[in-house]
Amino acid sequence: MKMEKMTYREALKQGIREALLNDERVFLMGEDVGHYGGAFAVSKGLLQEFGADRIMDVPLSESGFVGAGVGAALAGMKPIVEVMTVNFSLLAMDQIINNAATLLHMSGGQLNVPLVIRMGCGIGRQLAAQHSHSWEPYFASVPGLIVLSVGTHEDARGMLLSALKSPDPVILFEYTFMLNMDKEVAPDAGAVDITKAKVRRDGKDITLITYGNGVYKSLEAAEELSSQGIEVEVIDLRVLRPLDEETLLASVAKTHRALVVEDAWRSGGMAAEVFSRIIEKGFFELDAPLQRLCGQEVPIPYPRHLEEASVPQPQDIVDTIRKMIGL
Amino acid sequence: MDLPALCMSVISDHLKANYKHMEEKIKAVVYDSLKQIAPETAPEQLGLDENIREALNIDSFDALQFIVALSEKLNIEIPEKDYGQTATMRNLMAYLKKKKQV
Amino acid sequence: MIEFKMPSLGADMEDGTLVEWRKKPGDLINRGDIIADVDTQKGLIEIEVFEEGIIERLLLEEGVKVPVGTLMAVLRPLDGETEDKDTSSVISPEEPEIREEAAVKPSIEKEERRVKITPLAKRIAQENKVDFSVIEGTGPEGAIVKKDIEKTMAGSAVPSKEVVRPDEQAKAASPTIKKELRTPSTKAIRTAVAAAMSKSNREIPHYFLEKKINMSNAMSWLKEINSHRPVQKRLLAAALLIKSVAASLDEVPDLNGVWEDELVIKNEINIGFVVSLRAGGIVVPSLKNADLKSVDEIMEWLNDVIPRARSFNLRSSELSDSTVTISSLGEGGADKVFGIIYPPQVAIIGFGNIIEEPVAQDGMIGIHPMLFVTLSGDHRATDGMIGSRFLTALNKHLQTPEKLGRV
């Protein structure tokens, strides 16, 4: 199959475009998504193509427009709500958790909320502490939500399509850091499996579990380690909620070691949950203490070198794994 | 040769053969039993008047086992007071032949 | 948990090779069951367990040689209690010293180092019956990891303690080695005897006593008994002598015990009886609770144990725990034998020849069968006076064999 080189941004845009073309109930709403073309230029040109009814600029009121999205979903639409970055989502937390995630329960199963909320997430562009955090774990702890992390171009292209098929609210984390990154993507790439974690690289020596920004960094480290004779199995969690235990446990049963890499803060991060599952069900497979490389527990700094130092880098991964293997 | 003489001769030969056979059998049992107790020795080479226990280095426990083996294999009773008659091959054989009425 | 360790079958035993496990994890063990065959310098020995429980784990691989005291298996007690059963079963309250010693034991065992091992490595070790307590870990914080267990299994581990692995060839030929192992080489036995006796001679200041005992009564009694018995049931003088020793030790208990920086008198009278091997060397099976056995029972024991001793077919319990030793030359040999004490015991009794001698008795000279008895005592534990009292008691008992025969 002929592969096509495109940026993560372009892949996201094509995913949105395809969703809009597929289903007329789908529309995009968010701050600056229309005339400005998106704060990160993801939706550039879509307003011209689809019109103001389907590409809607909204006031700077996260609680308001996320709530409108919930209402639209209840009314039978398939809204894609863009929250510029996860940092602003706190303003919409009441709508997301108390309404989107809870209405099915409160209505005794009568009201599904087929809402997709896209959020920019993580570091990457020197946007400092109020625009750069990785808060996937917050959302991943909420029953009623499906939480997806777009860690690759393939998923950037197809994950939205899958998310729109869900009858329940989906949080889709996209990564600012990767927007300009070029990768080969199949031109007809489409919906992806959002029920399973994805083994991005096979290996027998250690299981590296990651998501989001961690995926490419982990694959880079795995490549380096492979040249040193260590075969790392890289698992992209993809679905942060509900966690795909089966894939994780199967891999640990093979490699007997596990490392979690994530940009989110260490305390209460995804690693904590992943490890609990492994210890609960895979204790007797473990041949080494579980290890994690997480974001430094500081507000993300502004200067580039400090920003880079605040999250795990490929070299950190290489070093940690070598140590775990006993080299 | 008349018939009675011939008969006597045949019977005598038979008895002699039988006697010879029994003696061989007893000897075999004796050697066998000694071999069992002292496997590394060659009891066939014992002199007729050699003290068996001394020659084959048999202690009192094994001596008793030897008597037990002879009693069982030859189906005879050997009282303790007769132990003295079992010291050499010559008097042991004589004693056993007497016991078996050979 | 009940810990089952490589037993010591005597002061001369330093190590043993596990030849075969007779039980597997999950098996119920009753008191006295044979758990394994162990090859020692004394031949292939059937090792018994004297606790009840269910085998939790076997920690040693077949073919592995380990020092005495190495943990071989872990048993789960049936009733869940972990108390050392020895303390209650045999020690009487009149022996505070010994009870104290026994009570201290479990706490010492609890102090054993905690082995750091990953869950996976532990699982593999258990599945393959690998004793990981002796493996040096190469993982984080010195933990034993899967690789270490696999190395051990492949025979290339660097053990922290002595773990000798059999060569692969010997392992492949397992059924045949078992047969060969049953008969230890003369050299091995010689080495074992040499080790024990050298230690004794080096460490124990022996004193020697000798007494001539008139065996007229004893021999007449034996003759009378034996005349009524088929040959299979006849008694040897040795049986009566063993009985007389047990009875005398009951009166002079100081000679029945072990030296552990002080004399520890044992409550049970377990008599080691030296069985000489035709090819040279000795094996010393132990008659447990000899004072509680009748002369007939002792004779039955001799009939059973001597042939097995000579064919190296004894169980672990039959070689251990002797509290005193008898060396009996039997009639026809040397007149006297002065024994070397088998450590950590404190006495050995030597029975020599019984020969007819002219004896002055009550102003008359008579011909009597006389037995030369010797006693070698550990002078650290007892003095000649004690030894003398023992020989006097022995003489007394042998003059009234009918009393000995009554029990």
Image: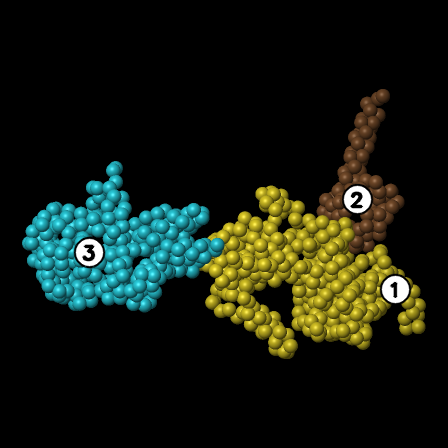
**Residue at the spot of label 2:** B41
Q: In the rendered image, is residue C24 in sight? A: no
Which one is nearer the viewer's eye here, A46 or C319? Answer: A46
What color is chain A drawn in?
cyan
Label 2 marks a residue whose chain is B
**Residue at the spot of label 3:** A40
Q: Which chain is yellow?
A: C
In the visual, does A210 lie left or right of B32? left
Q: Is mark 1 on a helix, strand or loop?
A: strand
In the visual, does C3 lie left or right of A119? right
What residue sits 85% from the left and 21% below the top? B1
Q: Which amino acid does label 1 sit on?
A: His
Query: Spatial distance from mark 1 to mark 3, Cα to Cα?
Result: 123 Å
Label 2: few (<14), some (14–19) or many (≥20) C-alpha neighbours in 10 Å: some
What color is chain B drawn in?
brown
Label 1 marks a residue whose chain is C
The N terminus of chain A sits in image quarter = top left
